[in-house]
Amino acid sequence: MCGIIACRTPVPALEFLLPGLRRLEYRGYDSAGVAVHTTTGAIARLRAVGRIETLQKRLPGWAGPDLDGVGIGHTRWATHGAVTEQNAHPHNDCSGRISLVHNGIIDNAGELRAELAAAGHVFESVVDSEVIAHLVEDRFDELGDLRAAVRAALTRLRGSWALAVLQGTTGRLVVAAHRSPLVVARGEHGDFAASDPAAITEWVEHLRVLRDGDVVELADEHRWSGLEAPLAAPPAVPCTWSAETVQLGDYRDFMAKEIDQQPQVAARILDELGPGIVDGAVWTGLGLPPLRRIHMLACGTSLHAGQVIAGLLRRVGGIPVTLSVASEVDEEILEADTLTVAISQSGETADVLRAVEGSSAASGSPLLALTNNPHSTLARRADAVLSCSAGPEIAVAATKTFLSQVLTGVGVALSGLVACGRLDTTRARALVTELDALPDRLATAALTANQLLPTLAAELTQASGFLFLARGTGLPYAAEGALKLKELTYRWAQSYPAGELKHGPLALVEAGTPVIVIDDGDPRMPGNLAAVQARGARMISIGGPGCAVPVILPRATAGPPPWGPLETVVPLQVLARTLALALGRDIDKPRNLAKSVTVE
Ligand code: F6R
């Protein structure tokens, strides 16, 4: 949600800021802007409402002094204030000598704005971030040093920040972070900072992740400090995302690429976890207490992954599991011996971070983080971290990260059940054998989905609302299918347990209403569906042989596996994408959304 990049290079900064911003655009795409140091010791600020392309088109119009190699850039997902050029970042101080980009929320922005305005500062926007630029100006006037001024300004803030501050007169560049991600790195082209490693992965091999309260000046030496005193830099970690992984290649959009990558992602996760499931080593390696009861927290798609994992723990191991929507976690009362499991692909979701503070920290319950970002704030707060290893996901709608959360969660859950004696190794081995077949099953599901769904989707473009039905282990997948359809097509979609239909939602069904059914062979399903068919619904069943979209291949044992009909998520993703394409939607950047939701 919003993206930041900063660079200090010997060549024109725009050569790095613009490609970096394009890679960050999935974090927010309401407006974008850059501020670049000029050869005359001023700051050139250019901003535009809309996408990076719009900003790029404005650049040739710059008639001021030459731009040099130091600059900052931002792509915005609006939280405070409308989507206007005035509210776009970078924000300047009164004199235009200091320019700043910021991710996060300043909780006490209102009182600071009033204080600064009373002292004569003039604000251009209604954005909380602008307050920081004026605070730095205020402190600079007193201290005469940019780094000291930034540190002093930050001590006045409450909230979260990842920010980069550029000074015109000197070309100095200072970055800082607190409860919002930021990395710095040095490569052969110069120094970089970014809120997401994807932005700079092409130019650096190692990076350092800022800790809460860190301030760093990107100078000949990177000078690290906390708010009060100098600090040692954290260790450099390899930048594991290769440039190729964040490029489209031959695909039309990232969602298509990421759907397609799922069999490979599944194979990689199962290779990594497989051996440690049967002997309980995945679990014991985490160093957590024995599994007794679990409280899971997540939002959106990650919540659906949590539903799959929670169902398996209850079904296979009889473990009591509660699952909370992270934004509503205040309602939960935790028992002793509870392990908190937070699931978040980004590890930066504000609702999850707040829930973790209120739940795990307050109760003393150990925290296990299941995340695709092992450097994230969530990972840093957790007692143990399980990396989902999906690789970078650029499309805003989660696809391969859902799959990876499900498989990693299922792997660690089964391993934990073995370790605490609730699952014998013979059954564990049989389940691992079944898991090992999943990459092929997912690949087959993708083939079938890509063959059948374009025709089916073409019939549905006029439908204003969709019902998704399932029973038992299929329910999280129906919920995920409905969420994907809403996000991508902007059409109403609702999932229900099929048995619940007759208790009210059946009133929605009329001739032609699309009803998508996840049919995993539950014997009660045909009865539920008869009521829908009798009212003339346009039913599309996704399931085993005989279904309209037959993606569940026969299994050796009766009934669904304890993780449910995972293969069905592929046609559900393809349905949402194909219909969105037919409706002319932006597949990778749906309206109003952004990857990684860092506001509550
Ligand atoms: C849907 C989607 C969102 C996220 C949710 C939580 O496609 O991506 O619903 O799942 O915002 O995000 P994370 O997993 O980063 O905590």
Image (cartoon, rainbow, N blue to C red):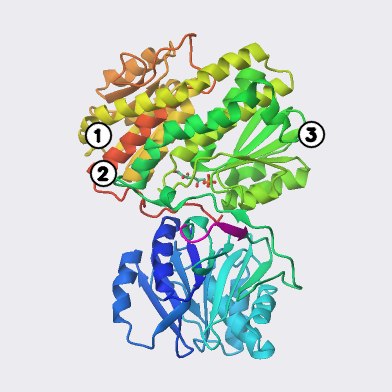
In the picture, the quarter occupied by the C terminus is bottom right
On the image, the x and y values in percent for residue 243 come to 44, 53
Q: Position of residue 237 (x, y in %)?
A: 62, 54
Place of residue 241 in the rendered image (x, y in percent of width and height, measured from the top left): 50, 50
Q: Which residues are magenta?
A: 202-208
Q: Residues within 10 Å of mark 1 (few under 14, many from 20)?
A: some
Q: What residue is disc 3 on?
A: 336
Numbered mark located on residue 457 in the image: 1
Label 2 near ligand 1 (CB < 8 Å): no
Per the rendering, the mark at residue 268 is: none
**Proximity of marks 2 and 1: CB atoms separated by less than 8 Å:** yes
Q: Identify residue for label 2.
A: 581
Q: Residues within 10 Å of mark 2 (few under 14, many from 20)?
A: some
Q: Position of residue 198 (x, y in %)?
A: 48, 55
Q: Amino acid under label 1?
A: Ala
Q: Residue at x 33, y 38 (%)?
A: 576
Instruction: Tell whether 547 sits left or right of 398.
Output: left
Q: Quadrant of residue 460?
A: top left
* Viewer-side label of 2, 3: 2
Instruction: First in sequence, mark 2 or 1: give its number.
Output: 1
Residue 213 in the figure: left or right of residue 456: right
- Give the answer, above or below, for where 309 lies relative to 578: above
Q: Is mark 3 within 8 Å of ligand 1?
A: no
